[in-house]
Every structure is written in structure tokens, then in C-alpha cells.
Amino acid sequence: MSFLATVFNKSTQSQRYKLLARLTSYSCTVHALAISNNGHLLACGGTEGIKLWDIKSRKELTSSSHHHESRGTISCAVWAMTTKTAEETLCYGTGLGYIIFLRCSVADKTFQEISTKRLGSGFEITCLSWCSTPSEGNLCIALQSVFAVQLENTVPKSVAFADNRGIYVFRLYDGNVIKLKDEDGEIVQEISCNSVIGHAAVHLKRGVFVVDNATDGFTLYRLEGDGEPVRTFATAVPTVSVPKQVAFGEEGKTGQILETLHHADTGLVQTISTRDLHGRCTIASTSPAPGRGKTTIKIWAYQYAVQKVSGVPSGNYWSLSCILMMLTRLLALVSMIVFLLINYKDSLLDSAVNHARGYMTSATMNNVTDDLSWHVKAVMMFDEYVDVEADKEEKLMELAQEAGRDINVDQQENENDRLRAAKRDEQTKDLLLVQ
């Protein structure tokens, strides 16, 4: 199914994941690792309190939370990001029932406590889960109880929100999964996995969850199933029976082993964390070094898919730091324009005038002039042609009129000749009669 980031032994396989960082913390035991939602920060919690790192720079960040002696060992941690702000908020629980929220201060870039509360009777907080809602606040964290439910004979190892308005609770010893309503905590369904649940991870998109069965590996189930396992990912028989954390990563479908990562030569790897973001899977693992009292944390990453470019701005786009950066750039641009106008106004105007003159005397302007003169010549030629045709028409009319006058003259002369001939004939007749 999906890549299970829980096996860290030597392997002869080709390396897909690249080691990004190797961090060292002087802490005897680490119980919680959490990679931030944007993949930039790592939180580590245990017997010595909480520690934070910038993954890219490998630098430890300053935190104001220094009360681990009175609040107990850190047992779990989760990063939260509200829909109204891009600021990451770290939430962690302790063995004495305290829940603490940390957020990075914009002023001094240190993580400050913004809320602390002890829940119930002060029993250990074994697991945490975060679900963002449209009505959540964006300026501060104010804890408000929605409902409280007591489950008899239950040690919850994992808890998860579901898209179907349900909350899933995974119980340690009896291996049961309880589904609660997110409104009042009423039990809706109970599924038995027929094994101890050492740890559990939920993949909401595919509607499945995987558990550490504490015997031969990890077992995959369906959230809306009847408790029948989909498949089991077998591992070597453990030498020590301890709970092992499990998490989903990448978007695999085959269930085959992709890679085995080597964390350390000795010791147990019980605490892990993964973050799958934009086709890049990041894995963090930790285990104590026996006898030296310090912990080694390793971080790997693998780009398994091409990042998709979205036209919609992400949540970080409108963060305060991004807005300040945009305003700074805009101010710098305006200042540069004002400086150029004040100091180089005359030279800029001269350059513009010279450019216009050059354009007016350039070959482009000559072509425009030639083209215009050609059109003028064409119009003049057309006018001359019209005048010539008009002259021809006038001459034809004159010729026609002259021809008409000539015809009339000829007709008149013919008539006169006819009359003279008739008169001569009359005179001849008279002469004959006299003779």
C-alpha cells in the first residue's frame, strides 16, 4: 500500500532517500518527533523538554518553554496551522496532563508559549490530533471544551479525525478501534483488530489505517470495514517487544518495500515522523545512544513526484512576512523612480526628444513619406485621367455638333439645286411652246 517509515536497517538497495541532516540532542529519551506542515521545522520532545530545529539550516531554534521539570516528560507533539493564518503552531502534551502551545514571535523570531492548560486529573496525554475548522481563531489559541468522554479500561495510543464527522480512538491493550461522534462523543462503532495496537496511522484520503500489531509487523485495515485485515506488512521478529511508531508516506499502491534506511548500528528506532508535501516525502527518526546520554536524529527526503504549480496563492502567500517583503520592494521601486525623475529629468527628456527626432529622420519615416507621396501621385494621376476623359467627351460633342451643321448645309444646298433645276425645266418648256 503506502510506504511505512519504520524500518531503518542496512540495505544493498539503491538509495532513493537522501540524508538531509544529522542532529544531536543531549537528551536521554525522545518520545515525540513532529515535522511542521510546511516541512521546514522539526520538533523533538522527551525527558528534557521540547527542542526545535530549522531543517534546512540545521540550527536549533530558541524556545521559551523551560518548565519540563514541573510539567512532566513530553509524550506527544503535533504541528497545527489554522486556515486564517500561515503561522505554524506547535502543540504538545506531557506525562502530567499539560497541553502547551508554542508559536514563533515575529519580533524576536523565538517560539513563545501562547497557551498552557492542565487537562482533567493530570493523567498522561498519550496522543494528540488536530483538525482545522472554518471558525477557528487566527490570533490566539483559546482552549474550549467541546465534549469530554470517559472510556473504561482504555489506554489510547492514537486518535484521528475523519472526514465523515467521526473521531477514531485506537486502544492499546485490547486492539479495539472506537468511532465517536465529533459533536458529543457518543460511541458509534467499535472494531476489533484482534491484536495489540502499539501505534496507529490513518490515511483519510484512502480510508485506511495501519497499526503496529506488536508481533510480526504492521497490519492494514479499512476505516469503514468490519475488522478484517486488508494485508500485513511482515517484519523480522523483534528481539524486544516494544511499541513501534508507523506513518504513511509517498502515494504508493503496490505494498512493496521501497527502501530500507539505516539509522544506527545499535539501539532501537521507536520514534519517527513523516511529512508528505508537493510530491516530496520527508522522514525523521531518532534513537538514544546507549551510555552517552545523547540522542541522534536523522532526516531524509525524497522527491517522488513533480511538484504541481498552482495559480492559486498558498496559505503562506499572504503571511505577514510576505506582505512586508512585497511592501518593501514596492517602496524601493517608487524611491528609485522618484530619484530618477529628480536627478535625470532633463537628460531623460532630451533623450526622448532625440529619439523622436531620430525616428522622424529614420528609414521608417522615409518609408512612410514615400508611401504617402505614392498615394498622392496616384490621386493626381486619377484626377488627370478624369480631366482627359472629360476633354475627350467635350470634343466628341463638338464634333457631333459640327457634323450636324455640315449635314444641314448639304441638305440646304441639295434643296437649292433641286429648285434651280426645276426652274430651268420650266424655262425650257416655255421656250418650246413659243417656238
Image (cartoon, rainbow, N blue to C red):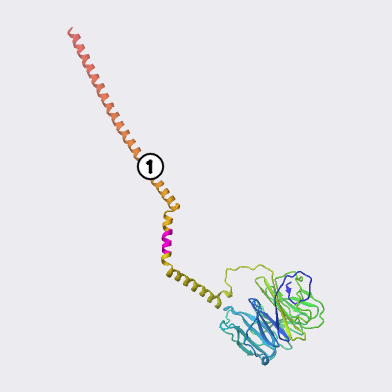
* Residue at the (67%, 71%) spot, across then down: 280
In this figure, which residue is indicated by the disc labeled 1?
Answer: 381
Residues drawn in magenta: 348-355
Q: Is residue 313 visible?
A: yes
Q: Quadrant of residue 243?
A: bottom right
Task: Give me the residue at 73% from left, 73% from top.
Answer: 3
Residue 258 sits in quarter: bottom right
Horizontal side, residue 186 vs residue 233: left or right: left
Residue at 47%, 71% (x, y): give it. 336
Q: Position of residue 28 (x, y in %)?
A: 73, 86
Residue 96 magenta-highlighted: no
Residue 211 drawn at (x, y percent): 75, 79
Q: Quadrant of the N terminus?
A: bottom right
Where does residue 120 sit, x and y in percent of width and height? 66, 91
Q: Position of residue 368 (x, y in %)?
A: 43, 51
**Could you tell whether 328 is left or right of 348 in the image?**
right
Q: Is residue 406 above or below residue 27?
A: above
Q: Residue furthest left?
A: 434
Where residue 265 sits, quadrant-wise, is: bottom right
Name the magenta segment's main secondary structure. Answer: helix
